Image (cartoon, rainbow, N blue to C red):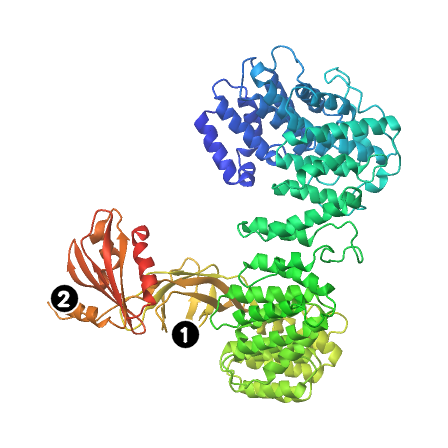
Amino acid sequence: MGPLSRDAWAQRLGAFRASPSAFMAGPEGEDLGRDLLGDLRSEKLSEQTKVSLLALSMEYPAQMWPDASAAEVAATSLLDTLVLLPPRPSALRRPLLLAATTALAAGGALGPTSGASCRLLPLLLGLAAGSDLGRGFVPASEQRPLQATACECLRELESCKPGLLGGSLGLLRGLLGQEGPVQPLSLLLALALRNTLVLQSRVGAGLGGLLTDKVSPTGGGPWDWTLVEEGDGRLQPQAPSWPAAEEGEGEHSLTAREHSPEEARELRAAVIQLLDTSYLLTPVAQAQLLWLLGWALRGLQGQPPALFKPQLVRLLGTAQLTLLHAVLALKAAFGEALFTAQDEALLLRRLTLAAQHPALPPPTHLFYLHCVLSFPENWPLGPEGEEAAPLLLGPQLCRGLLPSLLHDPMALLARLHLLCLLCAEEEEEEKGQLPSPRHYLEELLAGLRQRAALDGGPRALATLCFQASYLVACCLAGQPTVLTPLIHGLAQLYQARPMLAPHFVDLLDQVDSELREPLKVVLRQVVVSRPGKDEALCWHLQMLAKVADGDAQSATLNFLQAAAAHCTNWDLQQGLLWVCRALLRAGVRGGLVDLLQVLARQLEDPDGRDHARLYYILLAHLAAPKLGVALGPSLAAPALASSLVAENQGFVAALMVQEAPALVRLSMGSHRVKGPLPVLKLQPEALEPIYSLELRFRVEGQLYAPLEAVHVPCLCPGRPARPLLLPLQPRCPAPARLDVHALYTTSTGLTCHAHLPPLFVNFADLFLPFPQPPEGAGLGFFEELWDSCLPEGAESRVWCPLGPQGLEGLVSRHLEPFVVVAQPPTSYCVAIHLPPDSKLLLRLEAALADGVPVALRTDDWAVLPLAGDYLRGLAAAV
């Protein structure tokens, strides 16, 4: 089979990228690597196509060369192709070098027994040195790019096999002083030097003459793998970080042997040489270089950190975040040995002032705040690892970093974290002083709770309030003066907005006992003090199921008895039973027996009656320890479990309503524009046979009246189902999101519930037509409606873009049921009834080629922005 054409390769690569694993498992996957290597030498393919093939092998080396033998064959073939290239300039030399390096590194073939490794390493070192490899191997125009590529390849191989270039340190150091790419050579030398120092220290050896010996890169001798074999090949990744001075791999061994004066002098000269050229590097490369050298010299005897002082003077005022991060990493590594008290104060002041800059983008703002929170101090107080605010962060510096309700959520939480650290260190405030951080914290939390308590407020405000409460509880767990008002404030928040019960449950699961136990007591008192017929009964039952225990049994049982008469639907009955289950696990008996008997007789739902009967049987037959095990998270019974529960696990599982993945999909069709109410048309589709499907819909807030559940006796996959009609009863004409909950029975007899993706009711889904006026009276009817909108209503004009269909096509597609007067194709009068009792009137006249001016009138001013957005989006909706 001959080489493939460019189009054939394009189709093949497209199929591979769509699903690499599926392609490799197919009939063409086995030959992909072989065909790719063979067609790289074909003269029928352009260099651009060959570069695409090499890019594929570098992106997916694990799929292309799945084992060491395949990687060895691929690297050998790629090197042969590189040697066979003609001496003229070619775009393939650099990709071939990168592909061969990637194959050996990713395939695990790099080693002393690999023939391709023995060929590639001298070649790369020779290219990095700018040596003449003969036969016009490197055209003059490609020498410098190839030199940089060779350095990058060597750096990758050194990362995979630390110590690989230990014997070439002298050569690389000499190259740095010659003409050549400074950045690749600097990073390569720094990485090789760092790895060599760590590995030599582990075995108790010195550098010897490694920094002065200039070995010939193409001398023909075998590559020295001694240092690689002595190391374990695992060093910390080359990412700047702020580790403690005593952490890391191998640092403790750097002090095991002091270098000789000559070795120390050569090492110092190499480090100074790298630092002197660092200003020529990009900011990211400079940060990488500083981190590598700091890692290499930290704790090394005879190498003072003062070597970094000239760079520190240059970088203390840098505006580059990567370089600032590198400076902080150096500070964490060397502390007071490199940074004076004045340096530390200057750096902290710069961070705090920068964090207050109003024009910073959010990621940069958060970076500066993180630097302040994690500032590495010269002389930190307290035990190691304990969070604390920097000692030099005085009240004047802190004042601009205090959180405010106007900050975005992430910045507010970061600033709140700092405020909590300040509160942890605060001493008793004196009279006459400014408000203390603790007082400011209480006011901030009160403001967050006030916003979260707004009825119908965004969920993000409630989430932010609970995130802030969790952060305060974590940072100030041992501060009763902070936790006590926090607990009472959260109780008042629940009292004002019980629908936040899921947030309270999650908070109780996350916080420590210092906040969890007193908060549970207060919340239980708030719940049981409410009447059992409260509109928020479902939230009270959910909260009580979390906080109920053996304390205050009589108040809890009285609340449940009062609530039982109002638990008329399945959700409320299940919530009531979950509270009974919690009381059972807490060891409550007494009045619970009577309550379960009443529930077993009076609950309307058979499932609820069966649950109540089961709980009554368990309570009557099991002692407290066995009852706790039987009602635990798992029914895989240990030795304490009763025979009754063990023999009826299947029965209990069948009674439980289990949460399961959604086996039904729900899509929206066009809404019905007849009748007194808007009606959504829903199309269900089952993934498996399900029975007795009940779809429940809920709208957050008070936008719509409660929606009735929709029932479907049976749904089977592949069998079309009739559309479901869902009437809407808007209390105001506004879009809404419908949360959908499905309850169904599977073919195995289990009752399951699942949450379906939400449905969105658009503004246009609420449109209803007015009654059709008598023939010929349309204009008068419309003018009467038009005049009735003012003066109580509102009027506006909107430009409605037209697509290629023109005004007539736009009206027929979107507004035809609501047209009262039509003079096509230039003028239309549209009257739309918006439930419950609003109207929207449109005059579309004098259309131009690209749009039409629309005059709007409505008796409800809140409709205007919704109508404007709807009209402006009509052209795009076609």
**Left or right of 253, for residue 671:** left
The percent position of residue 544, horizontal first and vertical second, equals 61, 78
Q: Residue furthest top?
A: 135
The secondary element bearing badge 2 is classed as helix
Q: Is residue 717 above or below residue 441?
A: above
Question: Badge 1: few (under 14), some or many (20 or more) residues near its Cα, within 10 Å?
Answer: few
User: Does residue 104 sit above or below 821 in this rendering?
Assistant: above
Marks 2, 1: nearer the viewer: 2
Disc assigned to residue 708? 1
Identify whether 423 is placed above or below 262: below
Residue 578: percent from the left, percent from the top? 60, 77
- Left or right of 204 in this view: 719: left
Secondary element at tag 1: loop
> Is residue 877 toward the left or the right of residue 217 in the image?
left
- Say which residue appears at 35% left-offset and 60% top-offset: 669
Q: Which residue is mark 2?
A: 779
Report the amino acid beneath label 1: Glu
Sequence-wise, which precedes: disc 2 or disc 1?
A: 1
Where residue 84 sits, quadrant-wise, is: top right
Residue 294 location (% of width, % of height): 75, 38
Closer-to-camera residue (792/338)? 338
Give the CA separation, mark 2 to mark 1: 39 Å
Q: Which mark is residue 419?
A: none
Answer yes or no: is residue 3 visible.
no
Residue 133 vertical placement versus 652 (above, below): above
Residue ranking furthest to the left: 776
> Picture coordinates of residue 229 (x, y %)?
80, 31
Between 401 and 660, the residue placed more toward the observer is: 401
**Total residue callouts:** 2
Q: Residues within 10 Å of mark 2 (few under 14, many from 20)?
A: some
Identify residue type, mark 2: Leu
